């Protein structure tokens, strides 16, 4: 009971992000109980929280040595290998975890994204279907509530059929992978119904292209259904994974006029920037963009809502418009602003997919370990011809990335 109380106390410290204090308390406990696999795995997790992946690997290996069937330690070991770029070892550790316990959805999902990063699409897309069973994905809790009785589409002929497509995950996923809906419509002459999470995305789509319904609406009659990202598996099986993006955004003349007027007084090169994402490790410190603004006499237009203007207000060439995207329609201003810019430099967020889909040249600084969809190429992506990737060469270090960006800005505009 004393051990249980102490472990609970350590977990409480971790929940409050007091990682160093939790580490010290846990070290005392491990001194008394040195071969406890659970405690050693927890110690490795603390190392992960502190971005000390090499040290984490040592503790996870100790945990596995003391209990070869510790699934959590095997999964965490794989995650640590992934975070230092040892991808083959990560794959082997995920496999070992699945061999011990085959029904853990989160391990399968982690395994799938590692395979997809390595472009091992056949097994990767099969494994990725496990996300539908994972409680970590709220989309699939909502999916269960739909109680759909239609068959899941797996590439069957859709002539004169109705296909329900369920949007999932983030808005960037919706923007990036909507291209497949146009491909399905063109190839199969199918009627497509898109199930969207929110009405704030409804203005993206022409009603002539698709029917749109929203969370809470009654599901109309349809022949098949599929999740948006599951379409990739179908297209891969048909040897047509990488289809061209479609600029499907609808023009808003009123908003367009507003931004023509707002931006016309800024003569010269105008570059959109965004440094904030939904994941902390993908965020870019604003100082790197400030340094670009110090050196280059361009205008930098901030394309994000949550922004500390105090950090940049003394720089007259960093522009922030606080009335941007305040309406109920997502990105209604961003779309028209981006169209009028010369270049977009953005963290890996929905703005990157928005800009690239609009056909604008887009540069994306990426962390050392980036999302699976960017694969391992350091510069190019198979999804967009107008995107350049700038991958960090080590964790938590953007310095070399922005040196390259600065040099490329000079080459492009000076």
Image (tube, helix red, strand yellow):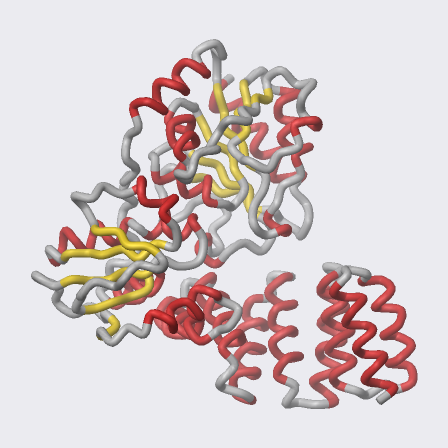
Q: Is residue 371 visible?
A: yes
Q: Residue at x 16, y 43 (%)?
A: 208
Above or below — where is 399 with respect to 186?
above
- Residue 183 in the image, given as x and y percentages of width and height: 20, 52
Residue at 59% x, 48% y: name it: 282
Residue 123 visible in rendering: no
For the image, the number of numbered tags is 0
In percent of width and height, residue 345 lies at 51, 34
* Depth check, front residue: 78 or 4: 4
Quarter of the figure with the N terminus:
bottom right
Above or below, 319 relative to 86: above
Whether residue 141 sits left or right of residue 6 in the image: it is left
Pick the front one: 341 or 376: 341
Name the quadrant containing residue 397.
top right
Residue name at image x 59 percent, y 52 percent: 279
Residue 212: x, y in percent?
A: 26, 51
The residue under the point 57% across, 28% down is 407
- Image height check: is 244 above or below 236? above
From the viewer's perspective, tell me whether residue 286 is left or right of residue 147.
right
Residue 158 quadrant: bottom left
Q: Position of residue 366 (x, y in %)?
A: 55, 46
Q: Is residue 300 left or right of residue 226?
A: right
């Amino acid at each position: 009971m004393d051990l249980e109380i102490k472990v609970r106390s350590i977990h409480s410290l971790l929940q409050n992000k007091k990682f160093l204090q939790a580490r010290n308390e846990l070290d005392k406990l491990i001194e008394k109980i040195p071969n406890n696999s659970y405690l050693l795995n927890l110690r490795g997790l603390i190392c992960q929280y502190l971005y000390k992946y090499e040290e984490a690997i040592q503790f996870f290996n100790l945990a596995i040595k003391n209990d070869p069937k510790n699934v959590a330690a095997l999964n965490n070991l794989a995650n640590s290998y992934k975070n230092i770029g040892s991808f083959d070892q990560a794959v082997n550790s995920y496999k070992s975890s699945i061999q011990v316990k085959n029904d853990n959805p989160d391990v399968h999902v982690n395994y799938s994204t590692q395979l997809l990063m390595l472009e091992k699409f056949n097994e990767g897309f099969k494994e990725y279907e496990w996300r539908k069973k994972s409680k970590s994905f709220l989309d699939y809790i909502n999916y269960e509530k739909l109680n759909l009785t239609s068959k899941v589409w797996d590439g069957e002929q859709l002539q004169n059929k109705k296909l329900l497509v369920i949007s999932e995950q983030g808005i960037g996923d919706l923007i990036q992978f909507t291209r497949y809906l146009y491909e399905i419509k063109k190839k199969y002459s199918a009627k497509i119904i898109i199930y969207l999470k929110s009405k704030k995305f409804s203005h993206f789509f022409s009603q002539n292209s698709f029917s749109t319904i929203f969370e809470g609406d009654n599901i109309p009659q349809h022949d098949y259904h599929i999740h948006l990202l599951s379409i990739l598996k179908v297209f891969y099986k048909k040897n047509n994974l990488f289809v061209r993006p479609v600029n499907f955004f609808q023009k808003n003349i009123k908003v367009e006029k507003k931004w023509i007027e707002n931006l016309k007084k800024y003569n010269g090169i105008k570059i959109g920037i965004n440094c904030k994402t939904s994941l902390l490790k993908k965020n870019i410190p604003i100082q790197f963009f400030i340094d670009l603004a110090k050196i280059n006499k361009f205008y930098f237009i901030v394309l994000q809502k949550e922004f500390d203007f105090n950090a940049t207000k003394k720089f007259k060439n960093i522009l922030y418009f606080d009335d941007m995207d305040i309406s109920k329609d997502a990105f209604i201003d961003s779309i028209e602003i981006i169209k009028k810019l010369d270049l977009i430099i953005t963290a890996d967020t929905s703005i990157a997919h928005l800009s690239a889909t609009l056909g604008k040249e887009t540069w994306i600084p990426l962390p050392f370990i980036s999302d699976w969809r960017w694969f391992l190429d350091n510069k190019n992506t198979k999804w967009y011809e107008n995107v350049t990737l700038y991958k960090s060469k080590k964790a938590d270090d953007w310095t070399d990335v922005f040196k390259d960006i600065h040099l490329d800005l000079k080459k492009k505009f000076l």
